[in-house]
Amino acid sequence: MRRIYIVVHNEVFPEQALKVATQMGERFSQEVRWLFLEEKKHLAPLPNYSSLPNDITSNLASIAEENDASMFLFQIADRIKAKQIQHLLNITRELRVPYLFIKESHEVDFSHIAVSVSFLEEDKEKATFASAFGRFCSSNITLVTANDYGSKAQTHTNAIATLLDKFNLAYTRQKAEKDSFGIDKEVVSKAHAQGFSMIMLSATREYGLDDLIFGPKERRLVQQSTVPILLINPRGDLYALCD
């Protein structure tokens, strides 16, 4: 059985993350476990779930593969500091599974998932994850295509739609106002108005100088988002969320 891990990384009991993980575990028929970045004596032992009290800051990807993890959940404060998010982003960059950031005030809801689609090749990898939520959580899916001059973003949207059609899933297409460089920010900023309950984004492929100085786009988006954000690393050897 595959496993969904709630990562405990601060002194706050991750109540919202537990709700999300429990629902996902039921929908995907997967086990929910706790994973500690460091020992939290005041939170352990936690009933009904297994615990792996390890310092995993340098080998989260190895833990994921050795324990057949399907996803990691991080509950964060509503006003989390940038350096705290960056620490979590640093330890998740090698993951082959998605990882979800949910704030303390976020609601637990998979009813409407937004998937941003740009000209980047890795955005096609969102298809398997979007289809999993559609199949097992009955999620309505909105494919938001970047408003580019070229056709790559539209081609990637078509590729995702092909898989969704295979499973007869409910989805809509939407053209963004921004191009591939601004689409993620647009989707996040309009999440509440559009009724999105979760957003699926690709993490930055490689950190450039601006990313090292000012932080990658996902750091700012996680800080600003009013709904949970599911991040997927840009690699071609990702593990599917469900078998």
Image: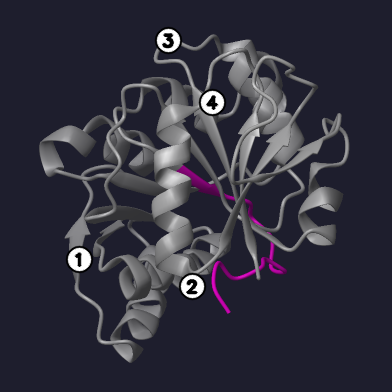
Task: Please state which of residues 99 and 184 is positioned toward the viewer in this rendering.
Answer: 99
x%, y% of residue 106?
31, 29
Q: Are marks 3 and 1 in contact (CB under 8 Å)?
A: no
Q: Are marks 1 and 2 in contact (CB under 8 Å)?
A: no
Q: Which residue is mark 4?
A: 219
- Residue 26 makes an appearance in the image: yes
Look at discs 3 and 1 and give the one toward the viewer.
Answer: 3
Dot 3 amino acid type: Arg
Q: Quadrant of residue 55?
A: top right
Q: Quadrant of residue 96?
A: bottom right
Q: Are marks 4 and 1 in contact (CB under 8 Å)?
A: no
Between the residue at mark 4 and the residue at mark 1, the CA separation in whole angstroms equals 26 Å
Q: Is residue 105 magenta?
A: no
Density class for disc 3 (Cα within 10 Å; few <14, some 14-19, many ≥20) is few
Q: Quadrant of the C terminus?
A: bottom right
Between the residue at mark 1 and the residue at mark 2, the CA separation in whole angstroms equals 17 Å
Residue at the (30%, 41%) spot, across then down = 108
Could you tell which of marks 4 and 1 lies nearer the N-terminus?
1
Instruction: Report the span colored magenta.
Output: 230-243
Label of residue 79 in the image: 3
Dot 4 amino acid type: Arg
Main SS category, magenta section: loop
Residue at the (70%, 40%) spot, across then down = 92
